[in-house]
Image (cartoon, rainbow, N blue to C red):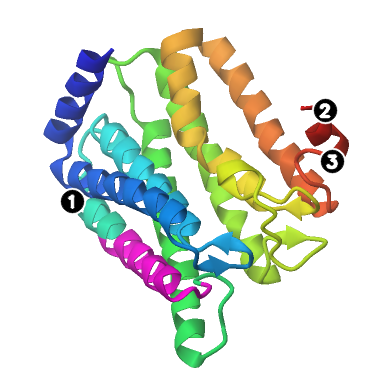
Amino acid sequence: MIEGILNFIQELKFRNESLFWFGLLCLSLSIIFLVLTKITSTQVHGVNAWFKPFKFAVSIGLFSWTMALYCDYLSDFNVTPFNWTVITLFGFELIYIIFQASKGQLSHFNISTPTHSLIYSLMGLIAVLVTLYTAYIGLLFLTQSFPNLPNYYVWSIRLGILIFIVFSFEGGLMGSRMNHSVGAINDNSNWWILGWSKTVGDLRVSHFIGMHALQILPLLSFYIFKNTKATIVISIIYGLLATTTLVQALNGKPIFTQNEQKES
């Protein structure tokens, strides 16, 4: 297994060195941030300030590595502009999140000063630009043929990108509300390491589930289902799961009720 992981890392580096190193940097930083959650006491909304940089570093690292792999499958695609779009924009966002965490201040939903308001707006623009670029890549996957790849795997990438796009834009719902909670103000009652609310609706749940379709569906298809119809069915179920958690959050309900938590 370790040998397989090392081979994958070497292959990823060969395919897209720029996104490989950026992704590795983000994942390495995430380990540092996780350690900081244990040795520091700075909090934002009742949660250790370093949990947010940790989650964003992991998410950006996984996105970078995932797209490095997918882009290599495309023919006649100039990957360099995409690489630097991701590195520059997400790099800026992560640096700001780290800076705000170090001060014990909000990065998102922070419009307390003109500067904070401007940077928060820029982060929203960053999310839109990267999502639109990813949507373009998804369109290329729909219009190109991939004779060297299993059909079920190609469909898992297509559907994974589609669900990612939908629930990436769902983040705009949180931005418009200036709040990720429904029934409270940015509740962080900290369900496990994810920080999801235990008491009210949390829009981050569907955002997380939907965006990570980008990795989960291709993994399930390639290693488990290995069938086009099964891949499409599980993708529909996965999309419905993300949608259900969104509706649940909008109704002000946590992902698990208090009774379910006590039973577990």
Which amino acid is tagged 3?
Answer: Gln
Residue position for label 2: 263
Residue position for label 1: 80
3D distance between C-alphas at marks 1 and 2: 51 Å
Residue position for label 3: 258
Quadrant housing residue 66: top left
Is any part of residue 133 visible from this angle?
Answer: no
Quadrant housing residue 84: bottom left
Query: Residue placed at 43% from the left, 21% from the top?
Result: 219
Taking the magenta stretch, the answer to whether it contains residue 93 is: yes
Which amino acid is tagged 2?
Answer: Glu
Q: Would you place residue 117 above or below residue 137 in this image?
A: below
Is 129 placed left or right of 187 in the picture? left
Q: Main secondary structure of the magenta part?
A: helix
Quadrant containing the C terminus in the rendered view: top right
Residue 67: x %, y % from top left: 32, 39
Q: Would you place residue 227 above or below residue 233 in this image?
A: above
3D distance between C-alphas at marks 2 and 3: 9 Å
Which amino acid is tagged 1?
Answer: Thr
What span is colored magenta in the figure?
A: 88-106
Look at discs 1 and 2 and give the one toward the viewer. 2
What is the crowding at mark 1: few (fewer than 14 residues within 10 Å), some, or many (at least 20)?
Answer: few
